[in-house]
Image (cartoon, rainbow, N blue to C red):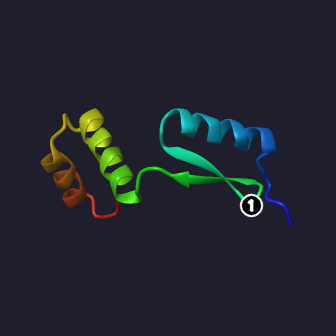
């Protein structure tokens, strides 16, 4: 059964190309096929995203995010 919003080959290739341009993904030919690998690990990615969130919404101050989470345990 196909997913309701299956991505087409061209869309996937475009996404991979853009990720390669940003340095997030590298490609390597293996056994006649193009294989793609992440360049950064998950931990580094998560830390960067959290820092971006802090900068955008909390003036770069982690204590403000912690205070919000303490006030709203349902988040």
Horizontal arrangement in the rendering, residue 54 relative to residue 38 (left or right) = left
* Residue that sits furthest to the bottom in the current view: 1
Q: Position of residue 66 (x, y in %)?
A: 18, 54
User: Would residue 51 appear left or right of 3 to someone viewing this image?
Assistant: left
**Quarter where residue 10 is shown:** top right
Q: Give percent across and percent down for residue 60.
A: 19, 38
Given residues 54 and 32, the one toward you in this image is: 32
Residue 47, image x and y in percent? Answer: 30, 51
Q: Secondary structure at mark 1?
A: loop
Q: Residue at x 61, y 47 (%)?
A: 27
Q: Pick whichever, 46 or 35, lies toward us.
A: 35
Which image quadrant: the N terminus?
A: bottom right
Residue ID at (63%, 42%): 16
The percent coordinates of residue 24 (x first, y second) are 48, 43
Tell which of 51 and 32 is nearer to you.
Answer: 32
Left or right, 34 with respect to 59, comes to: right
Quarter of the picture containing the C terminus is bottom left
Would residue 65 appear left or right of 12 to someone viewing this image?
Answer: left
Q: Nearer the viewer, residue 54 or 75?
A: 54
Identify the residue shown where x is 16% and y is 53%. Answer: 67
Q: How many marks?
A: 1
Residue, x 41% and y 58% (percent of image)?
42
Q: Which residue is mark 1?
A: 31
């Amino acid at each position: 059964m196909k997913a309701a919003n299956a991505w087409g080959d061209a869309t996937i290739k475009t996404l991979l190309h853009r990720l390669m341009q940003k340095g997030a993904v590298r490609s390597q030919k293996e056994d006649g096929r193009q294989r793609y690998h992440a360049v950064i690990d998950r931990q580094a990615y998560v830390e960067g995203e959290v820092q971006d969130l802090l900068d955008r919404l909390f003036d770069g101050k982690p204590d403000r995010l912690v205070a919000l989470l303490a006030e709203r345990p349902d988040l």
